[in-house]
Image (cartoon, coloured by chain):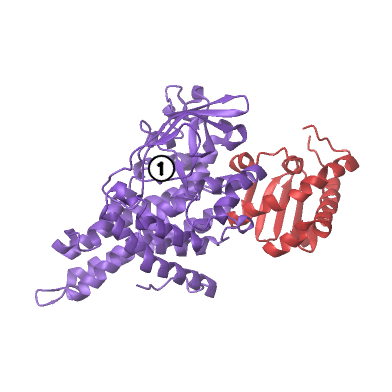
């Protein structure tokens, strides 16, 4: 369903890009997402899964390189264009949005180095890939450390007692990596490369972490089983194990002395993606509610003609418009500024995912018993939205971090 | 003590950027990219605007509307040209601040590499330290 955009100054290019993304979202992404949602986690990633056709189509259209610079073969989108496209993706499937865009994370971060070796080894092959065969993941979450990994500013964060589940030690010109990432690594069991957070200097707790790029076909890498979960079942997630995995010294792109500010840069980008997809998800729920309330007759008249229903639909609409305004303005700020003001990304993620959850919840209520059945998409949207409140930092933890940043930096100049 | 004084910085930057634009592939790539850059350097205070036609300084530079604005110290500039700057670290630690689309900022860094090859000869010419 089309929507009226409050920004009446969209260029023809902006509108064309949104239309292309919408066509992709409606005709391929959402149907595949529904199909995958009904499969087991093993079936989702099986050789004959529709997931792989989806990825190949997405890569052929260049959607995997939306965040990357044109110089390397990326799309070079403006922040507004990125938001327009991501909202359509989120409308179609939150889980597949994550799967497709997290694929670029190791390569996006490699771009920051402008290092020829990393660019040739990782960035260029990824940008040239058109069949979905090169896929990254963001391996930050650990079995014993969920919220801990972004507890910047808390005493525990810098405590030597905070022992990471993945450790890296320098051995000559190589880093040697050991340990385990948790079941919640998106794309974890099928990624070809990881943007890996690991502890380099345990005397500093998590402030002693580093970030490296690890091809996951190296000796010593193994995977866990794909995770079965309540929502975003189309998104593969699972553990990655490292047993004496060796990488060249130069692939550790972030060292402890700037790990904390770099964590904020990565978190700012990731949370903006979440916020824009959540806007699409909130809109999907609103559209289902409007469509149903126009058709369904109760008490002798259509639901939309009932006094209270008009108010409820209006609330759904308000959350969508607010989410779009919040996520778009945060994206236009932080994708136009290096380094970003992370609190605006955190704010957008928290606001928009909570709006998406509330909209999917309210949409089920409007659909009544029909909303609870597998026959309609509403219950899937609800399950997907529930996961977003925890994904990429649970909202309470993100709010805590946002408050910490505000305490240190407000007002920004 | 800063590496450059203002006069040296403007003269050196002017020569370096002009040579990069006129005599290396950088000029063509900058034009193709459509990127224009305003550098706001501190210590010494230098404002420079660069597009495919070459660098402009001071008032002329400030009147331009760039795609990307980059702020950094003169010493950070020197380190960058000498290939002694860890770019992710400099961005994270706010030694470099940029305004403009992030993917354009990321694009500028590899585009500038011809300048890194030319820079050592300017260090000799202007008697600037390279062992920092």
Q: Residue at x 52, y 45 (%)?
A: A106
Chain identifier matching the purple colour in the rendered picture: A
Judging from the image, mark 1 belongs to the subunit labelled A
x, y percentage for residue A206?
Answer: 47, 30
**Quarter of the image where one finds residue A27:** bottom left
Q: Nearer the viewer, residue A247 or A353?
A: A247
Q: Colour of chain B?
A: red
x, y percentage for residue A36?
Answer: 31, 56
Residue extending furthest toward the left: A299
Q: Which residue is mark 1?
A: A188
Name the image quarter holding the N terminus of chain A.
Answer: bottom left
**Quarter of the image where one finds residue B128:** top right
Q: Is residue B131 left or right of residue A85?
A: right
x, y percentage for residue A273?
Answer: 44, 54
**Quarter of the image where one finds residue B14:** bottom right
Q: Is residue A181 left or right of residue A308?
A: right
User: How would you rate the neighbour count of disc 1 (Cα within 10 Å): few for under 14, some for 14-19, many for 20 or more?
Assistant: many
């Amino acid at each position: 369903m089309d929507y009226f955009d409050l920004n009446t100054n969209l260029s023809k290019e902006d509108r064309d890009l949104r239309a292309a993304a919408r066509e992709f979202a409606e005709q391929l992404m959402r149907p595949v997402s529904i199909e995958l949602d009904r499969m087991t986690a093993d079936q989702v990633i099986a050789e004959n899964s529709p997931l792989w056709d989806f990825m190949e189509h997405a890569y052929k259209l260049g959607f995997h390189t939306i965040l990357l610079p044109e110089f390397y073969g990326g799309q070079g989108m403006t922040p507004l264009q990125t938001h327009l496209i991501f909202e359509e993706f989120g409308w179609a499937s939150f889980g597949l949005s994550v799967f497709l865009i997290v694929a670029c994370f190791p390569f996006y971060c490699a771009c920051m180095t402008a290092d020829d070796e990393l660019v040739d080894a990782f960035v260029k092959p990824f940008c040239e890939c058109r069949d979905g065969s090169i896929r990254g993941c963001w391996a930050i979450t650990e079995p014993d450390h969920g919220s801990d990994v972004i507890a910047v500013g808390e005493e525990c964060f810098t405590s030597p007692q905070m022992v990471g589940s993945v450790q890296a030690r320098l051995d000559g010109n190589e880093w040697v990596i050991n340990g385990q990432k948790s079941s919640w690594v998106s794309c974890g069991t099928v990624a070809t490369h990881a943007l890996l957070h690991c502890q380099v200097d345990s005397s500093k707790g998590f402030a002693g972490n580093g970030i490296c790029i690890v091809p996951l076909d190296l000796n010593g890498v193994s995977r866990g089983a794909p995770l079965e979960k309540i929502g975003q079942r189309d998104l593969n997630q699972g553990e990655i194990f490292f047993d004496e995995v060796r990488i060249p010294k130069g692939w550790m792109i972030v060292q402890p002395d700037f790990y904390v500010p770099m964590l904020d840069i990565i978190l700012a980008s990731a949370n903006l993606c979440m916020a824009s997809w959540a806007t699409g998800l909130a809109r999907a729920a609103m559209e289902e509610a409007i469509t149903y309330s126009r058709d369904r007759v109760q008490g002798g008249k259509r639901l939309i003609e009932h006094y209270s229903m008009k108010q409820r639909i209006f609330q759904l609409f308000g959350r969508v418009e607010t989410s779009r305004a919040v996520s778009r303005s945060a994206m236009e700020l932080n994708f136009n500024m290096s380094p970003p003001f992370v609190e605006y990304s955190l704010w957008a993620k928290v606001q928009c995912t909570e709006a998406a959850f509330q909209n999917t919840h309210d949409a089920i209520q409007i659909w009544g018993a029909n909303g609870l059945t597998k026959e309609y998409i509403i219950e899937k949207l609800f399950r997907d939205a529930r996961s977003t409140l925890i994904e990429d930092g649970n909202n309470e933890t993100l709010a805590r971090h946002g408050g910490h940043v505000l305490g240190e930096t407000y007002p920004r100049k | 003590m800063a590496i450059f004084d203002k006069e040296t910085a403007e003269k050196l930057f002017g020569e370096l950027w002009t040579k990069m634009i006129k005599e290396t592939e950088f000029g063509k790539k900058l034009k193709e990219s459509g990127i224009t850059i305003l550098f706001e350097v501190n210590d010494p205070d230098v404002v420079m605007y660069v597009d495919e036609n070459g660098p402009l300084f001071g008032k002329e530079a400030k009147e331009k509307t760039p795609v990307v604005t980059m702020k950094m110290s003169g010493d950070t500039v020197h380190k960058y040209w000498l290939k002694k700057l860890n770019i992710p670290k400099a961005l994270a630690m706010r030694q470099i601040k940029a305004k403009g689309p992030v993917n354009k900022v990321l694009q500028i860094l590899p585009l500038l590499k011809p300048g890194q090859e030319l820079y050592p000869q300017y260090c000799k010419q202007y008697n600037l330290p390279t062992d920092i």
